[in-house]
Image (spheres, rainbow, N blue to C red):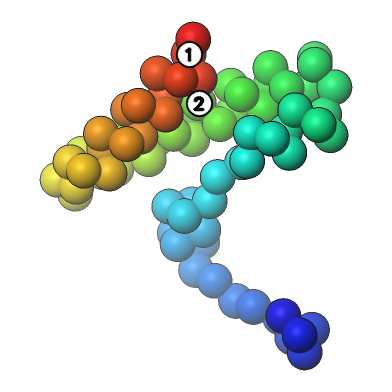
Amino acid sequence: MRCSVPIYVAEDVMKEASFIPESDEQESISPSKTENISLTKLEALRAQLNEAIEREDYEKAAKLRDEIKKLEQ
């Protein structure tokens, strides 16, 4: 980061590790756009949940399930 060099990351790693911070979402985006982002985030979390279940990573699946429940409320 200090040297301003590009950082290359595999797309699969980014999909698994990425998230949208809730505090940034609420501050910088209008209410109408927040709903679309929430739906997109919800869809992404559901996909990650399915992948975690397929890999039998039940600890991660439980965390994703809890995050999905929070968004659905």
Pick whichever, 73 or 41, lies toward us: 73
Where does residue 5 sit, x and y in percent of width and height?
Answer: 74, 86
Which amino acid lies under the numbered mark 2 shown in the image of this protein? Leu
In the shown orientation, is residue 10 left or right of residue 1? left
On the question of residue 54 being in view, the answer is no
In the shown orientation, is residue 9 left or right of residue 23? left
On the question of residue 27 being in view, the answer is yes
Q: Which residue is mark 2?
A: 42
Helix, strand or loop at label 1? It is helix
Answer with the quarter of the image where residue 29 lies.
top right
Rendered view: 28 above or below 68: below
Where does residue 7 sit, x and y in percent of width and height?
Answer: 64, 78
Helix, strand or loop at label 2? It is helix
The residue at the point 32 percent across, 27 percent down is 65
Rendered view: 67 above or below 13: above
- Number of labelled discs? 2
Q: Which residue is mark 1?
A: 72
Rendered view: 70 above or below 48: above
In the shown orientation, is residue 56 left or right of residue 10? left
Position of the N terminus by quadrant: bottom right
- Tell me which label, 2 or 1, sits earlier in the chain: 2
The residue at the point 37 percent across, 40 percent down is 48
